[in-house]
Image (cartoon, helix red, strand yellow):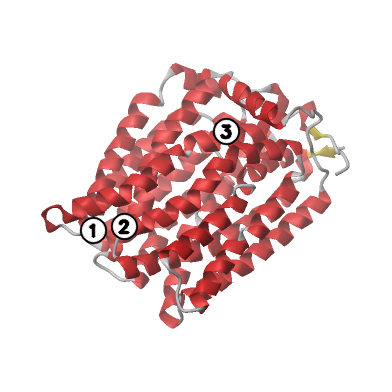
Amino acid sequence: MMNKNSNFGKFMLLWAGELISGIGGGLTSFGLGVYIFDKTGSAASMALVTLLGFLPTLLLSVPAGVLADRYDRRLLMMIGDGCSALGIIFILVCMINGGATLFEICAGVFVSSVFSALLEPSFRATITDLLTEEEYSKASGLVSLAGSARYLFSPVIAGFLLTVSDIKLLLITDICTFFLTVVSTAVVRSGIGTKVSEKKEAFMQSMKEGFVILCKKKGVILLVVISSFITMFMGMFQILAEPLILSFSDAKTLGIAETLCALGMLASGLVLGIKGIKGHFVNILCVSLISAGVFMSGFGLFENIVPICIFGFLFFASLPFANNCLDYLVRTNIPGEAQGRVWGLTGFISQIGYVIAYSVSGIAADALGKTGGRGVGRGSALVVIIAGICLFVTAALLLPRKSIRELEDEKVPGICPDADRIIKQEPG
């Protein structure tokens, strides 16, 4: 038997591995973005690579969630992290042999994403395995901080490395981080018991039960559906921020600008990691997303790096508060034994918005840029402004609904900090 009160140190080791992996992934993402824009000058080409890298994670998130409830979650994380390096290695080999084509880059990113799909549901469910409810908010803040690493540390590091070398150095560095992450997960796995499902129902039946659990509370499913709209607007910002800046600046300036913007996420992540949020989760969620919409629109108004960095900083500062509240409201309303399946389902539904964003934002930016001879940079800016307005309206109109507010008062007994803190330890 194992008490979750003793496991925050293990969580920190796991978190450190994900932090390192995030930095490595950010180096590759930044380098490929600059490489593709330099070769094609098209926002649509950059969006295509992002879409093909994201689509497997989305499509496989539900079965990956079922696997996370049926098998060893830490082992799945190790397989996902370790094997996802294969796609990056493929791109590196193509680069060494004379330069990778757009097709080869898409193929490598796709393969890497297929294995990465195993990671997210297992990682989120492992947090529930390790921690008490009182620690969830702090953990969520730290997870947001690790997620911000690709925006905070990676761009400035990549921008500097690209001045002394080329993209191959970024890919090699990323490949090395995969193995560090696998080692940290292996250490955590050796120190805790394996939690596996006592039920041996069919795979499809497990998926169905996860969906039924998700839909039991109207507020949870409504929150997840709203999240899909939110991710669509944020995905447009994510895709178009780079071509917006690159249209009037260079890779080094882009790296510095992205890092300065991401300092907002660092500041908020540190506050949440230390203090957490004690209550009023729905109110904080509404305010943070409304603010994010305003700052997103402000980001696209100027073709000047100073106001861009200011609005970008404020935009990123609002995100950890929104992520923290969303995480808490869902996590505390789902039974512990179904966390893997439900996180897989919520990831699938909420992130459909990213697919739409990645599919249309680049094309829309290129088309608007050609209209009136504005150029791809101002076309990207216009799409970002519209997306910010839509985010503002969505948060203001839909999030204050009664069924969502009720989630703050209703919690599932199975994850409350009493007798249910004990995790059964089974072989395997």
> Please, what is the three-letter code of the amino acid marked with disc 2?
Ala
Q: Is residue 113 visible?
A: yes
104 sits left or right of 363 in the view: right
Residue at 82%, 47% (x, y): give it. Answer: 192
Count of numbered circles in the view: 3
Residue 311 x %, y %: 31, 52
Which image quadrant: the C terminus? top right
* Residue at the spot 51% in from the left edge and 49% down from the top edge: 269
Pointer 3: what residue?
A: 345
Q: Can residue 301 be seen here? A: no
Task: Tell me the quadrant of the picture where the N terminus can be found.
Answer: top right
**Mark pair 2, 1: CA separation:** 7 Å
Residue at which label 1 appears: 376
Please report whichever mark, 2 or 1, sits nearer to the chain's N-terminal start: 2
Q: Is residue 229 left or right of residue 273?
A: left
Circles 2 and 3: CB atoms closer than 8 Å: no
- Real-space CA distance between mark 3 and mark 1, rounded to the nearest whole angstrom: 36 Å
Disc 3, SS: helix
For residue 74, side relative to residue 218 (left or right)? right
Label 3, residues with CA under 10 Å away: few <14, some 14-19, many ≥20 = many
Label 1 near label 2: C-beta < 8 Å?
A: yes
Residue at image coords 42%, 20% = 401
Up-down relation of residue 209 to residue 421 (above or below): above
Q: Which mark is residue 194?
A: none
Q: Quadrant of residue 335?
A: top right
The single residue placed furthest to the left in the displayed view is 372
> Of residues 374 and 401, which is closer to you in this image?
374
Q: Residue at label 2?
A: 43
Q: Earlier in the sequence, mark 2 or mark 3?
A: 2
Above or below, comparing residue 419 to residue 191 in the picture: above
Where residue 48 appears, as percent x and y from the top left, is: 39, 54
Q: Which quadrant of the figure has residue 394? A: top left
